[in-house]
Image (cartoon, rainbow, N blue to C red):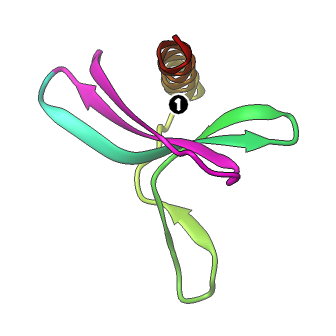
Amino acid sequence: MEITDVKIHLVNSDSKVKAVISLVFENALVIHGIKVIEGSAGMFVAMPSRKTKENEYKDIVHPITNELRQRLQEKVLESYQKELTKQRV
């Protein structure tokens, strides 16, 4: 399944969340609410989640294989960096 579009909303705040992303797959499926987060070990991608009654966060959508997780993370972080570069110009 190919990613055919990436929509990026940069978050301009002191928050650890730096962007909210929507990924479009083969112009047929979209996943909203993917976050780019600045962690202590660098940037990472968090899948859409919801808070449970026990105050835990559970992913609503997530890749099953490590291969797909890597592909998604690479595409999201690459797109985020390109958007940052465009904003600075």
Q: Amino acid at mark 1?
A: Thr
In terms of image quadrants, where is residue 42?
Answer: top right
On the image, the x and y values in percent for residue 59 come to 50, 58
Query: In the rendered image of this protein, does residue 35 appear above or below residue 48?
Result: above
Question: Principal SS element in the magenta part?
Answer: strand
- Tell me the residue at 56%/45% (across/down): 12
User: As rendered, which of 54 and 81 lies closer to the eye?
Assistant: 81
- Tell me the residue at 49%/21% (across/down): 87
Query: In the rendered image of this protein, does residue 84 appear above or below residue 47?
Result: above
For mark 1, what is the residue? Answer: 65
Q: Is residue 75 magenta?
A: no
On the image, the x and y values in percent for residue 78 come to 54, 15
Say what secondary structure mark 1 lies in.
loop
Query: In the rendered image of this protein, does residue 14 appear above or below residue 40?
Result: below
Q: Is residue 56 left or right of residue 49?
A: right
Q: Which range of residues does the magenta coloring cover?
A: 2-26
User: As rendered, which of 5 and 29 lies closer to the eye?
Assistant: 5
Q: Is residue 11 magenta?
A: yes
Quarter holding the N terminus is top left
The residue most toward the left is 28
The residue most toward the front is 89
On the image, the x and y values in percent for residue 39 come to 79, 43
Figure label count: 1
